[in-house]
Every structure is written in structure tokens, then in C-alpha cells.
Amino acid sequence: MDAVVTAVAASSTSRFRFPADDDDSTNDHSAVDFSSVSSEFDADTQLHSMTAKGITHLCSELLELKRESEEDFQKIIVTSYSAFIGIFEGTKNLESDLLQLKYQVAKQRGLIKDLTNGVFLKFLAEERIESNLEDSLPDYISLCSIIDAHTTEISEILDDLLSEHKLDEAISFLEKEAEFFKDRQMMENPLTDELMCYNSKISEKTSMIADQLTLVAKNPRISAPELQKALVGLRRIGESDLATQLLLKYYHSRIAAVTHGLFFSKSYTREVYLREVSKFLFSMISQAVKSFTLLHGENSPYESELHRWVMEQSAIFSVCFNNYVISMVEPSTGLSTAVEAVQSTMAYCSLLEAQGIELQSYFIENLRPCIKEVFQIHIQHFKKVIGIFASSETWVLGKYLVSGILSPDSFSTSSGQLSEYCLLANSGRKFITLNQAILEEVFPLIQLHMEGLILRGLLDLFAEYTGILESALMSQSEIEEVDSRINIAESVEQQVSLLSNLSKLAQIFSNMIRRAFSDTHHLQFEVDNYELFVNENCGRLRSQFCKQLILKSCPLESGHRCSLPPECYTDLEPSASYKELYFALRNLKDHADGALIEMNWLKDLFIELMEMMFDTILDKEEILKITEEHFPNECCGKFIQLTLDIHFLLEIAKWGGYLSDTIMNAYLDSESRMKSVFLSAGMDLERHMIYVGWATKNAIETLQRLHELDKTEMLSSELIDNTEEETSTSAESWGSIDSTKSEEVPRPLAHALEVAGCIKTGDIVIVPLEGDASVEEQNGFHDSNIVVQAKRTCVEVEGNQSDP
């Protein structure tokens, strides 16, 4: 401060030196010379001006001095504050050092006392062994007084530590005291009252420490590290059970609180809620397992409690999961949401396997009923969808690119199982697309061992669609029993298209299923059964179609009746219903060519049809009934008609390439039965052979006539088409438009029957010769002994003319 005052004085002295002082002699000399009043006035004015300037200059110097003083003062304050802070911190450290020193002194005092007690006890024991003195030690050095003093000192130390919340130091102190009590317990047996008092005091302090640690652990805002520290303290004082309970209770409360908060949180959608809950749940379980391991070690006797707690949390989550998924089932997104929730749950719980906890099998078992219920709800919804898009079906096949219907993972054209294009009805295409979408949506469930559930669901959908097709195949007499929303396949062409659609659909569907479950070898048996079920459904519908066509083609019950005397039979030709069958098969082949139906598949269908036809007509009981009842009339018309029909069907099978080994075996079996009838009637087998030869010849001729009629029909159709085309062209050239409806071209089958009406076959009269003759002559079937009067005239069918 003295230096500051000196500097201020020096600056003030220098600041008040004016330039006029240097010329004092000159000014004095000039002042003498001024004698008038005016010169004195000027001197006063000049003096006043110099004084003002000095005062102003002094003020500025004072302000500058003030500013410099403030800056110096601030520097002094800053320097003093930092020194004050340093002193304050040193004081705190000194206080901590003093407390630590105090604790060390107390500790050392205890050690010294322990050492003194130990030496004293050792000395006392030696004295007892050596001299067996009866004199007791003074009270101030007796063992009881030492234990009492030690107990009092221990109590004071623990009280100080507890009051200062130094629980770790208190626990460490108790651990050392436990060793002291153990040593005393071994030396004193039974325990003295002083040791019992000491033990009681230690237990009391231990209980107080446990209560404080429990309060810390139960604090709802406690962090995980603080909780772990408190639980370790409980374990150190022997409260492992309590520590385990507090640990599991802490994580349970956190799981419940966060789950409840997520449920009412508006920031999470219904789809995200389950994923976030499962993520948090398994994260908490993982943290609980880590904390448990840090608390008890790897191999702990409390692992069963941890496992039971984990299973309880998993059970609670399973119940919440099932209830929540069932409550949010929607036809549009419910299934995908449930699958995603299951997938995320399995993904998160698999992370616990690294910690030795396996929960996937548990969740698969407990979530399966929920997923099954959700899946079944959607399967019922999909059944309604199938019924909706099948209600508008017209049973017309369309050509679709396989790659446009199926994903690349669902088919492979290079394997030869599927061609590049396929013929399907509109409902069949939609059915395949629907099932592929379902399979892709629930594919994650296959990895979760729920593939059996998926297979059964897809099987139900296929059965539903097959049932719709079966209803569409019903005959007119059964239409009343069919759902009105199903379009009946009325024509044979529509029915064949329906069967072709089902056959191709079954092929694509089976291939798609096999590729989807190719990695699940344990399900190979179920997949094989599933494919067998598909084929059985296809076979059932094919059989239904064949039976209905057979019922239409078989003659009435009176068709094989003998209504004329055996000497005269007219119109010995195959039954008209079998002729219609020929035209029906011909029309179906034409339809298959136009609709691009596979001819091999159609041929197999016709073979199955002909086999069922022969099974029906060659029924054993029917043949025996006809032969045994009517054969005594020698040349019964019913027997002859049956023989002719059989051979006509054989010729149709040969003509179309439908003759199979099954048909030939059935035919040979029927021939064998007929021969046995001949033998039982006492007739020669050559007569039967004559019947067979005549029936074969007649069948071939009839088939040839039908071929001619077929050609005539084709020519007539072409002529009509050309005539209509020319008429249309002529009408357009003259600009005239005919508003009348043109007549429809008759169906080939109906037209063929109309042409057949113009042909009359002559009467066949069988005249046996008199005298001895061969068997052939007796039966009247030898060419030279048969008089055939055949008159074939073409009768024009006009108006209401009756049939000939």
C-alpha cells in the first residue's frame, strides 16, 4: 500500500507541473511592466483559466487512480479466494484424516487389547496347568472384566459407524469380531454369561445393520449398483435369504411397473407393444441373473429360487401375451401381428441361453394354444373368402404363368415337376395365391416347431375348396341340396374343366408344401399323409364325375328286356345311351384341344371312366340274373343286347386308346362266367363264340356309321358357318342389318342323333334249317343260313313326324 501511495503522489506532483513555470523570470519581468487597470484585468483572467485547467486535469487523474485501485482490489480478492478455497479443502481433508486416524487409533487399541487378552489367556492357561493355583486374578485383569470392556467398546464403535452410515466398515468390523467370538467359543465351553452378553450385543448390532441395508434395498429409486452393494452387505452378515428375496422383488417390481406403463403408453402401437414388453422382460431377467451370480457365485444353493422366479415371470408374461393377442385378433392384421410377437419373443428369450436359461420350449408349449386359436380364427375367415371367390366361378380354364402365381421359392420349373404355364380356373388361381400368402405369413412358425399346426390349417382350406368343387359337380337331382352361392358345372365340358383345375391345383399345392417343409425331416410322414389326402380328394371327385356320366350313359332297366318273340328281333344295335357316350367322349376331346387341357390327363380320365363303365355293366350278379333267367328262351333279346353293348364299349375303348388291362381282365372274367352259364344249360360253347363274333362285327359296323355321321356333322357345321359368313358379308355390303336372332347351331351330339333318325336298319330274321346241322346252323348265325333283309332308306324328318 505504501508503494501505491508513493506512486500516486509522484504522479500527482508530475501532473501539477504546468509549462508556464519554466518562464517565471520572463513573466515577472512582464508583470512589472503592466501598470494600467486593463493589464491587471487580463492577468486575473489568465490566472482563472489556468486554475480551471488544473482542476480538470486533477479530476481525470483521480478517476484514473480510482480505476486502477479497483483493478488492483479485484486481483487481490481473486488471489485471496483461491487461497481460501485451498485452505478450505485442506481443512476437509484434514477432517477426513482426523476421522480415519481416530478409527485407526480405535482399531489399534482393539488389536492391542486383543493381543493383551490373548497373551493373558495363554499365560493364565499355563499358570493353571503348572501350579493349579486357587487364587484368582484381580478383578481389573480378570477375563470377565476384559470381555465386558471389549463388549462395551465394540458397541460404541458400531454405534458410531451406524450413526455415520458407514455400513461397510461396520460389516468389516463385525466379520473380525466373529472370528474373536469363534475363538472364545472354542476356549469356553459352556459359554459364560459375559460371552453370551457379547454375542447378544453383536447380534443386536447385526440386526440393526440388516435393517438399514433392507431400507436401502427397498428404496424405489435405488439404482442397480447401490442395490447390489446393499445385497452384498446382507450376504456378508449372513442374510443370504433376505438378499435373494430383495433382489428378485426388485426386478419383479421393475418389470410390473414398466409393463403397466407400456400398456397405457400412447407412443406404442398394438403391434409394437408386445415386442417392447418381451424385450424389456428378458432384459430384466438377464440383469437379474447377472446380479444373482455376482451375489452368490456360479454354483449357489439358491439357484432353484432363481429358476422358480424366472418361470413365474415367464408364466405371467404368457398369460398377458395370450390375452392381449386374442383381444386384438383382426382378419386383416391379427395373424401377422401374432406371428411377429411370437417371433420376437423367441428371439429375445434365446439370448438367455448364454446364461444357462432355456425358455424356448416353455414358450412354445404355452403360446401354442393362443397361436392355434388365432390361426383357426383366420382359417375360418379364409374359408369364407374361398367361398366368396368361388361363387363367381364359371369353370372356364385360363392359362397362367406359374412364375406370376408362385414365388421363386415355391416352385421350380427346372425340376420337371411344374411346367412354365398352367391351366387353372379363376378360383383355383386365387386359391393358390391365398395359400401362398398364408404360408409366407406363418413361415416363422415352422422354425418354432409349429409346422404341424400350419399343415392342418392348409389341409382344412384344401378340404373346403374341394367340398365346393364336389358340390359344383352334383347332378340336377341334387341341386336343391347345394348352397345357392355355388355355380353348378352343368355341362360335361365344365365338369372336365373343373377336374383339370383340381388336378393341376393339387400338383402345384403339393409341390409348394413339400418345398416349404423340405427341412423338417421329422414331418415327412405327415407331409406324405397330406399329399395322400390331396390325391384321395382328387380321386373322389373323378369317381363322382365318372359315376354321373355312367348314370347318364347306362340304358334304362327295360333296355335289356326281351319284349319280342325269339324268332324276330329288330333294331339289334348298341344301346342309344352308349352311342351318346361315344359322342360325349368325342366332344370332350374337342373341348380339351380347344381349352389346351393335357391329353394324357384326359386319357387317364377316360380310362378310369371306361373301367368304371365295365365294372357297372359286367356286374356279376346282373350277368347271372340275365343269363339264368332269360337264356332258356334260346335267343333272348336281353342277352344278345347285353353282349352287343359290351363289345360296342370294347370297340370305343380301342378307338380312343382307353383299353387297359383292367378292362380286359373284367371282360375275360365276364366271358368266363357266360361260358359257365352255357355249360350249365347243356349247350355247346361254339354257339357262344358265334354270339361274340356277331356282336363284335355289329359293334364295329355301328362305330363306323357313327364315324360317318361325325364327318357329316362336321361338313354340315362348316357349310352352315360358310353360309352364315356369306350372308353376313352380303348384308354388310348392302348396309342392311338384320335385327332378328340367328338360330343356334345344334350340338354335335344332338345333330348326330337327328341324322341317326334318318337311318332305319332292316329286320334281321333268323331261320334255322331243317335236318341235321351244325351248332352254328342250329343257332342260325352262320352266314349262309342267315337271311338278312335290310332295307335302308333315308327318311326326311319333317314337322311332327314320329320316329320310325
Image (tube, rainbow, N blue to C red):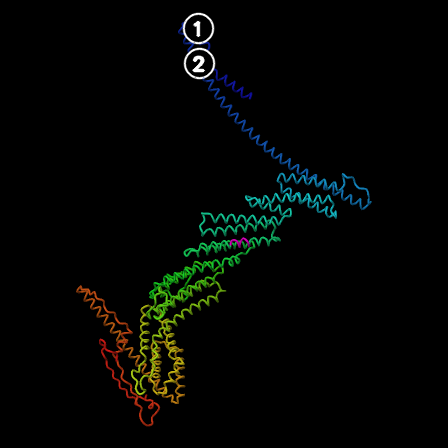
Image quarter (top left, top right, bottom left or bottom right) of the N terminus = top right
Query: What residue is rendered at 39% in x and 7% in y?
Result: 38
Vertical comparison of 428 with 780: above or below: above
Q: x, y (%) of residue 632?
A: 37, 87
Query: What residue is rendered at 66% in x and 36% in y?
Result: 102
Q: CA distance from mark 2 to mark 1?
A: 20 Å
**Is most of the magenta stretch helix, strand or loop?**
helix
Q: Mark 1: few, some, or many residues within 10 Å (few <14, many ≥20)?
A: few
User: Which numbered disc flags the more N-terminal residue, 2 or 1?
Assistant: 1
Across the whole image, how many numbered discs are drawn on residues?
Answer: 2
Q: Secondary structure at mark 2?
A: helix
- Residue 556 falls inside the magenta stretch: no
Instruction: Mark yes or no: residue 549 visible.
Output: yes
Mark 2 or mark 1, which is nearer to you?
2
Q: Choose top left, top right, bottom left or bottom right for residue 641.
A: bottom left
Q: Secondary structure at mark 1?
A: helix
Residue ranking furthest to the top: 35
Task: Give the amino acid type for the residue marked by disc 2 in the picture.
Answer: Met
> In this rendering, would 225 be left or right of 156?
left
Task: Give the amino acid type for the residue marked by disc 1 in the picture.
Answer: Val
Residue at numbered disc 1: 32
Residue at numbered disc 2: 50
Q: Choose top left, top right, bottom left or bottom right for residue 388.
A: bottom left
Vertical comparison of 62 with 433: above or below: above
Nearer to me, 45 or 574: 574
> In this rendering, would 181 be left or right of 802?
right
Residue ranking furthest to the bottom: 771
Query: What residue is rendered at 30% in x and 80% in y?
Result: 702
Q: x, y (%) of residue 79?
A: 55, 28
Residue ranking furthest to the front: 480
> Magenta part of the protein: which range?
311-317
